[in-house]
Amino acid sequence: MADRLTSLDTSFLYMEDVSTVMHVGAVMVFDPPGQRIDHDRVLCLVGQRIAHLPRYRQRIKWVPGHLANPIWVDDDNFDLAYHVRRSALPRPGSDAQLEEFVARIQPRPLDRDRPLWEIYIVEGLEHGRFAIVTKTHHALVDGINALDIGQVLVNDAPGWEKDAPDLWRPERAPGDFQLVTEAIVESVRAPGRMIEAIRGGMTEVREVSGKMLSGVGSIVSTVARGAAAPAPTSPLNAPVGSARRFVMVGTDLADYREVRSRLARGVHADDVSVNDIVLACLSGAFRSWLLTRGAPVHSATVVRALVPVSVETEGNTGIHDVSACLVDLPVGEPAASMRLHQIAFLMRQQIEGGRAVGADRLARFAGFAPPTLHSMGARLGSAMSKRLFNVIVTNVPGPQSPLYAGDAQMLSTYPVIPLAKGQALAVGVTSYDGGVYYGLNADRDAMPDVDVLGQSIVDSLAELTDGADYSR
């Protein structure tokens, strides 16, 4: 029987257009020994890693007449060198140049006639570094049956794997007659599936959204209970074009721990998580950004953030779902400490039932979990109504020990979360090896000043660490 895409995965193919691509990405910066990269060995490494993940050598095949959802078939013309591409920055190879490179290649749609992923090996960064920029389609990564390509590449110890023979041989794809026959057989067994497939899979998207907003999954959003109320008007919601800006912001995890340490002097530090501090930094950053734009900011001004939270079902130890918290970030509050306390209170209200997965367990999940879990969060954001929130913020803890691609140590990693219609900004956050890294993906025309927002995150964190009043 054919390996058929789910209706939700299929819906991401239907929803995609030139202005809103449906793939998630990452920018991983490495330091190679001797400041030299062996491109051929990296190419070989990718080939060895995907040898155990058949999905990365499969493409989409549509059923004639869309009588059923498309299926995965082996790509009999699979070309590893097509998916792993070599690029270089001109001197001096600054981070700003890398950001511009990412902004240009990330919005380009993936080739539907080939496996839905790409890797760019970007050489020429300052100080002998190189970057790996990844793109993986939502339809390919569901967090359970497939891992994001960024997670596949790295290991917790340096060293190259031994060369192994490539024994993969593509299976012959079924012809159109067989696809139609199987679709008819399935429709007889479950007639609703054919109707749903013909409608483009949108039925399941609406069902998924409804379940999230009604609180199914034991992650209940206080805001979502009143989901009929739209998100506040914000410049973060604007028509989205096909061009992007991307900003990388690196901060020290020690600063976030210092904030929690100071909190322990007046309140219980356990009541405030690093995620709460991240959201407080973003609240302060949005406040500064709006003020630089001359936008009105008053005591009741908020920015509603969709914050995906990883959960697990009872009796299981693996991560099975990502559910939504909708948090009104208190942008109108002038005191940094009060913004933090309000956010911590709102998040505690929403996470009920004891099924949310803690940061330590997330960091241990499947080794390097952030790329896959960022993809799951972005999928959730794409499925929900954009009228309910202003911005999506995915924050996934990563391991606090070094990771390697071959013999090159990963220095930092920045998520690239795709924009959905009406969303001018998407924020991805990953903690890794003593750092907290923000990836700000923005529409090029709607947010020409996204670099101001990036600097405001740094300033907002400094406000918390240096000037916040924790005695309140």
Image: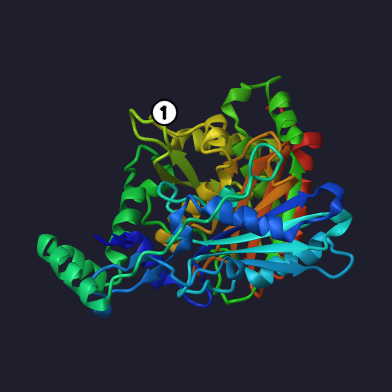
Instruction: Give above or below for 13 relative to 339.
Output: below
Amino acid type at circle 1 is Gly
Instruction: Give above or below for 24 relative to 338.
Output: below
Would you identify the image quadrant in which residue 25 lies? bottom right
What's the coloring here? rainbow
- Residue 53 appears in view: yes
Count all numbered tags in the image, as a single digit. 1
Q: Nearer the viewer, residue 459 or 471?
A: 459
In the image, is 198 to the left or to the right of 127? left
In the image, is 306 to the left or to the right of 175? right
Residue 314 position in % (x across, y down): 33, 30
Instruction: Give above or below for 365 relative to 39.
Output: above
The residue depicted at 34 percent of the width and 60 percent of the height is: 8
Q: Nearer the viewer, residue 460 or 309?
A: 309
Q: Residue furthest left?
A: 188
| Element under disc 1 | loop
The residue depicted at 62 percent of the width and 50 percent of the height is: 163
- Residue 286 appears in view: no
How many residues crowd around disc 1 within 10 Å: few (fewer than 14), some, or many (20 or more)? Answer: few
In the picture, the quarter occupied by the N terminus is bottom left
Residue 306 position in % (x across, y down): 50, 51
Q: Residue furthest bottom?
A: 65
In the image, is 235 to the left or to the right of 194? right
The residue depicted at 87 percent of the width and 58 percent of the height is: 126
Residue 226 position in % (x across, y down): 37, 50
In the picture, the quarter occupied by the C terminus is top right
Instruction: Give above or below for 5 relative to 428.
Output: below
Residue 470 position in % (x across, y down): 71, 28
Would you identify the image quadrant in which residue 424 lies? bottom right
The residue indicated by pointer 1 is: 354
The residue depicted at 49 percent of the width and 66 percent of the height is: 116
